[in-house]
């Protein structure tokens, strides 16, 4: 990737007024409410009787993915900008994506495990997303020796915490309460909201980058390669850990999908709705990495789920 292309990517600017950002936040909170509709406390009982797969899933998502993403970003430092590297780490620091449960169902994976991992990673994201981004972001900037061009990464923890709590915490509680006290309503809303979340995210990306469409189209093939490699890493972590640990094949499928699908919508909301990058240089690289990941993981998730679905290894 040439310096000209890198500069073009980083120069992409997305500016939303307060009304536009509030709309995105409300939509994302609504989507997370839809995810929580599938969370029933009773489904956790069987999963936690045999916690091995849950612990492995947390290891993959919360530890290995951010750490190995940081390593990957360091290895390809000469090919990407510091902002693109930070975008990769931000995506890896986000919790599991809200469509992973649907993908697990399509893949004939362990859906109960999928829901459990999504719920746990989402709940822990209130604390671990800012921490992982801060920790691995600083490791990356130091190791890549870019301190001279990029200001010290200072994350406004309260600002980020407040945003994540509003976008994830409140909708999660409301969704679980709806599922418990109004199960029929939850069953009716659950699937339409899963599909609606896909449409909403794509629309959010298109609207956000509409004023930079030419620059985005010019660099998308380079972004495609970065996200492709990063997503393959995430999928490989889940499948590899499941294979090494010899968990049932249905659980292995779930670990693959849960690690490979991230809530990049949250990453966009953090970039556009907080003061996270107030003192940073142009950070279009972070925006396009996060936005394209959200589109690409739908494609890769459906592809992997279809392969799993057609596999002969459909264990009970």
Image (cartoon, rainbow, N blue to C red):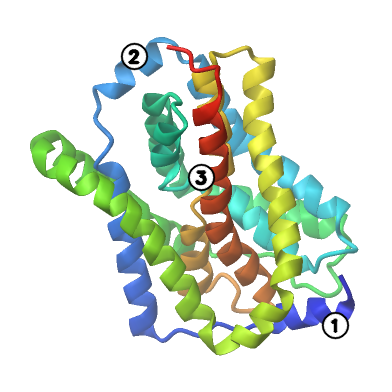
In the image, residue 196 above or below residue 58: below
Q: Earlier in the sequence, mark 1 or mark 2?
A: 1
Q: Is residue 134 left or right of residue 167?
A: right
Q: Considering only vertical position in the picture, is 186 above or below 208?
A: above
* Image location (x, y in percent) of residue 166: 33, 59
Q: Is 182 left, or right, of 279 in this rendering?
A: left
The residues tagged by marks 1 and 2 sit, at their Cα atoms, a distance apart of: 54 Å
Q: What residue would you read off at disc 1?
A: 4
Q: Which residue is mark 2?
A: 46
Front of the two marks 1 and 3: 3
Residue 287 as seen in the image, left or right of residue 70? left
The x and y percentages for residue 178 are: 15, 43
Work out which quarter of the rendered image holds the C terminus and state it.
top left
- The location of residue 164, given as percent across then percent down, is 41, 56
The residue shown at (43%, 24%) is 110
* Residue at point 87%, 58% (across, down): 144
Give the answer, above or below, for where 208 lies relative to 271: below
The image quadrant that residue 280 belongs to is bottom right
Mark 1 or mark 3, which has the lower sequence index?
1
Tell me which residue sits at (80%, 69%) in the image: 81
Mark 3 Cα within 10 Å, few/some/many (few <14, many 20+)? some
Residue designated by label 3? 302
Q: Secondary structure at mark 3?
A: helix
- Residue 234 visible (yes or no): yes
Is residue 65 found left or right of 251 in the rendered image? right
Residue 39 x %, y % = 28, 35
Residue 79 sits above or below residue 23 on the image = above
């Amino acid at each position: 990737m040439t310096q000209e292309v890198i500069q073009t990517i980083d120069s992409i600017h997305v500016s939303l007024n307060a009304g536009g950002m509030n709309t995105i936040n409300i939509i994302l909170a609504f989507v997370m409410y839809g995810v929580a509709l599938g969370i029933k406390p009773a489904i956790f009982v069987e999963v936690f009787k045999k916690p091995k797969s849950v612990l492995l899933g947390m290891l993959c998502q919360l530890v290995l993915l951010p750490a190995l993403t940081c390593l990957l970003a360091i290895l390809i430092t000469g090919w990407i900008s510091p902002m693109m590297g930070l975008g990769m780490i931000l995506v890896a620091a986000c919790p599991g994506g809200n469509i992973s449960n649907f993908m697990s169902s399509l893949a004939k994976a362990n859906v109960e495990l999928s829901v459990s991992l999504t719920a746990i990673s989402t709940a822990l994201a209130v604390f671990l997303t800012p921490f992982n981004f801060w920790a691995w972001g600083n490791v990356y900037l130091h190791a890549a020796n870019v301190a001279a061009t990029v200001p010290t990464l200072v994350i406004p923890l309260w600002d980020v915490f407040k945003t994540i709590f509003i976008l994830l915490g409140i909708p999660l509680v409301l969704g679980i309460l709806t599922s418990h006290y109004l199960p029929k309503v939850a069953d009716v809303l659950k699937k339409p909201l899963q599909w609606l979340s896909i449409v909403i995210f794509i629309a959010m990306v298109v609207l956000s980058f509409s004023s930079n469409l030419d620059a985005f189209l010019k660099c998308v093939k380079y972004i495609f390669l970065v996200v492709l490699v990063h997503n393959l890493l995430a999928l490989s972590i889940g499948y590899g850990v499941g294979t090494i640990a010899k968990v049932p094949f249905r659980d292995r499928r779930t670990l693959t999908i849960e690690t490979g699908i991230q809530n990049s919508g949250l990453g966009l909301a953090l970039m556009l709705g907080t003061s996270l990058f107030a003192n940073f240089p142009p950070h279009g690289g972070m925006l396009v990495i996060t936005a394209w990941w959200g589109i690409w993981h739908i494609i890769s998730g459906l592809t992997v789920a279809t392969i799993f679905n057609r596999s002969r290894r459909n264990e009970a």
